[in-house]
Amino acid sequence: MNRPRLLDMFCCAGGAAKGYHDAGFDVVGVDIKAQPRYPFEFIRADIMVDPVENFVAWVRANGFAAIHASPPCQAHTSMKTMPDARPHLDLIPGTRERLIATGLHYVIENVSGSPLLNPVKLCGSMFGLGAKGAQLRRHREFETNWLLMGAGPCQHTSPTIGIYGEGCRDSRRKYDKTIPEFTVVDGREAMGMPWASLAEICEAIPPAYTRHIGQQMIAQLQSQRLAA
Ligand SMILES: C[S@@+](CC[C@H](N)C(=O)[O-])C[C@H]1O[C@@H](n2cnc3c(N)ncnc32)[C@H](O)[C@@H]1O
């Protein structure tokens, strides 16, 4: 059976893409920047520049069955209130407008506090993610136009590994500075992205999240096809 095609908007190095691929989708990624480590078909483009009707025509012509979008989160992170923070464009409303216009199943991902509609929150602790005995939490939220089930409550334990712009943080260092930070190898393991750079894992969502989402979405697409 043919694998349905999924458009991965704002794809970066493909954390989200890997999970959808594992769930059974053929994935095509689009990013405004070159992504030499993206593991699937890749198109370099500004995905927000064409008029909505041209975007919809392109999506139809390429036979996509579903769309995932991870618009940049900088407009919504806690860093936005720092004194030296630059203003960032909120691409969520424009992205949603595009996705709705296609009529396809969609997922929009972003950080907690972003203006997503009735999102489902996922956490690394729901999937047993981590490295060297430290837990990866990395809360992210997902808006869908179809019924997405969560993955149960958070199962927080400590210590934690935090993957941010400056590196892979060990929570124990708050109390004991003799403990070294985690390495990028630890970060890759915690995220499930062995192919990616530090900067890329900082931007990414763990493939485990989109595997969970993709498995449900593909089941719904299949039952829709059977019912048609
Ligand atoms: C948060 S990252 C996506 C992370 C990705 N989902 C993952 O799991 O690896 C956002 C990406 O959006 C890209 N981007 C920003 N504006 C864009 C635009 N107008 N068109 C296409 N890509 C854009 C950035 O270059 C960046 O790689």
Image (cartoon, rainbow, N blue to C red):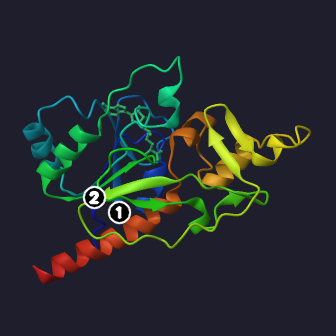
x, y percentage for residue 206?
53, 54
The answer to whether 170 appears left or right of 121 in the picture is right
Q: Quadrant of the C terminus?
A: bottom left
Residue at the image position 53 percent from the left and 70 percent from the top: 153
**Separation of residues labelled 2 and 1 (CA atoms):** 6 Å
Q: Residues within 10 Å of mark 1 (few under 14, many from 20)?
A: many
Residue at the image position 57 percent from the left and 66 percent from the top: 154
Q: Is residue 54 above or below residue 148?
A: above
Residue at the image position 18 percent from the left and 76 percent from the top: 224
Q: Earlier in the sequence, mark 2 or mark 1?
A: 2
Q: For numbered disc 1, what is the local secondary structure?
A: loop
The residue under label 2 is: 5
Image quadrant where residue 165 sits:
top right
Amino acid type at mark 1: Phe
The answer to whether 33 appears left or right of 143 in the picture is right
Amino acid type at mark 2: Arg
Residue at the image position 31 percent from the left and 76 percent from the top: 219
x, y percentage for residue 102?
14, 52
Q: Are marks 2 and 1 in contact (CB under 8 Å)?
A: yes
The answer to whether 7 appears left or right of 208 in the picture is left
Residue 22 can be seen in this image? no
User: 121 or 131: nearer the eye?
Assistant: 121
x, y percentage for residue 103?
13, 57
**Numbered marks: total:** 2
Instruction: For ligand 1, tell me if the residue under mark 1 lies within 8 Å.
Output: no
Q: For numbered disc 2, what is the local secondary structure?
A: strand
The residue under label 1 is: 25
Q: Residues within 10 Å of mark 2 (few under 14, many from 20)?
A: some
x, y percentage for residue 56?
12, 45
Q: Is residue 100 above or below residue 95?
A: below
